[in-house]
Amino acid sequence: MSRERDSLLDPAGTTVAAARAARGPRPAGPKTAGPKAAGPKAKAAALSVNEPRANRILGRLAQEKAAPPPVVPPALDGEVGSVVDGERRRGRGAVSNAAGRFEPAARILFDDGWQSLEDLPPLRTQVMEERARTVITRNQSPDVAFDRSINAYRGCEHGCVYCFARPTHAYHGLSAGLDFETKLFVKPDAPELLARELSQASYQPRVIAMGTNTDPYQPIEKRYEVTRRLLEVLAEFGHPVGIVTKSGLVARDIDILAPMAEKGLVKVAISITTLDPHLARTMEPRAASPHVRLGTIRRLADAGIPTAVLTAPLIPALNDMEVERILDAAKAAGASEAGYVMLRLPLEIADLFREWLVTHFPDKARHVLGLIRQMHGGKDYDSAFGKRMRGDGPYAWTVGRRFEIAARRLGLAGRGLKLTTAHFRRPKPAGVQLSLFD
């Protein structure tokens, strides 16, 4: 038995017999003769002999306990399996595509072991036509300066991750994430619907806002030109309109906007969130670059079109430090008014923005989210009127005062240009004789 045991290899690859020979003879010690020898003194002697080994074991356990836990990448919020591979969503804003909040089931992507997800094509923009019954949307919000608006498109290819219109895609059974940027709806008959609504005898003219939900000059406007045709209808009726956009495409329609501006029927607000091209591309991947937006302000102002700069949204610790620089640059380009809105995170946007922040700015994520909650009473968002657009608390107050001081210094503060309804006329149908005063 002993020969067989001595022939076994130890972990180092040597025989047990060789290892014993290398250690030399055992030191002489008391002989143990049966059970009686295992008394207190024998136990103490055994502990003293095994003390080095016990210390090694205890030391190793102490080291393992003191060692920091393994670093696990932070899990992204949202539905499991909704995060889309970076190559597939290249040039898009959202990180995930979780199912809409009204859906009874969630769509989950997973790899079955055959790397099938790698074969999926990049996300492409799809445009679907929507046949609406009306085109003018009304609201009673005390936070905004208009009570009616027009949105020629649903969804927006600009892909701004913070866009507060994202949750509206859930009403179509689609995701507020990547679906909002890639599955768009166009209302091709919107100009005809607008002319019909303006022609009603009960209609009372007030300023119509365009670009309050999705951008009227997003990239697909180049092909469909619905916004341009809407402006032609408004110009024909002499109806006032206010436009908000991030696109330089608005300058294409100067030939319509300039004559309207001479009558006090139009003003345009260009949204500039940052002057940093890298941050702009990350946050608003398919919107115009900051220098193009400043150039658009210059072109509109040179054409005599009242133009404002909208610093919206201001995101704590991400772009709010640029308030003064943005206003300085916009004033130099010809802006005559300025406004701002703090970041809003209603419904699905809270998770989408958190995912985006952890993905692109992991070192700032905790700080940014902490300041956002500080402005909303410890929550991601407070929908109360008077607070949802400005926030509350010391940080929101500080940003607001900085904006007011800079705007006042540059002459961008105060009441903006008020548009007129004095030119509103309903064109007579063909074949109807004009009255003496028409």
Image (tube, rainbow, N blue to C red):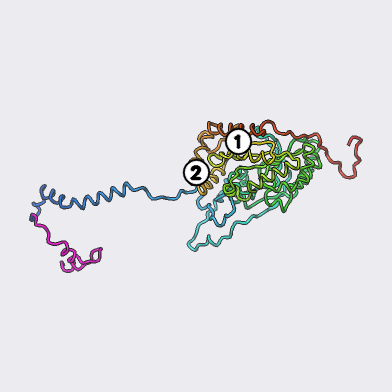
Between 417 and 321, the one lying in front of the other is 321
Seen in the picture, residue 226 relative to 122 is either above or below; the reply is: above
Q: Is residue 24 magenta?
A: yes
Q: How far is disc 1 from disc 2 in space, using C-alphas?
A: 21 Å
Mark 1 Cα-neighbour bin, 10 Å: few <14, some 14–19, many ≥20: some
Numbered label attached to residue 365: 2
Q: Quadrant of residue 207?
A: top right
Q: Quadrant of residue 353?
A: top right
Q: Say if residue 102 shows up in the picture.
A: no
At which x and y percent is residue 68? 36, 47
At which x and y percent is residue 128? 68, 53
Which type of secondary structure does the marked residue at label 2 adopt? helix
Q: Is residue 20 magenta?
A: yes
| The N terminus, quarter of image | bottom left
Seen in the picture, residue 261 relative to 156 is either above or below; the reply is: above
Between 52 and 189, the one lying in front of the other is 52
| The C terminus, quarter of image | top right
At which x and y percent is residue 54? 21, 51
Q: Amino acid at mark 1?
A: Met
Which type of secondary structure does the marked residue at label 1 adopt? loop
Numbered label attached to residue 229: none
Q: Which residue is mark 1?
A: 389
For the point 55% across and 50% down, the residue is: 95
Q: Say if residue 125 shows up in the picture.
A: yes
For the point 66% across and 40% down, the residue is: 330
Magenta part of the protein: which range? 1-29
The first of marks 1 and 2 along the sequence is 2
Q: Amino acid at mark 2?
A: Ala
Disc 1 versus disc 2: nearer the observer: 2
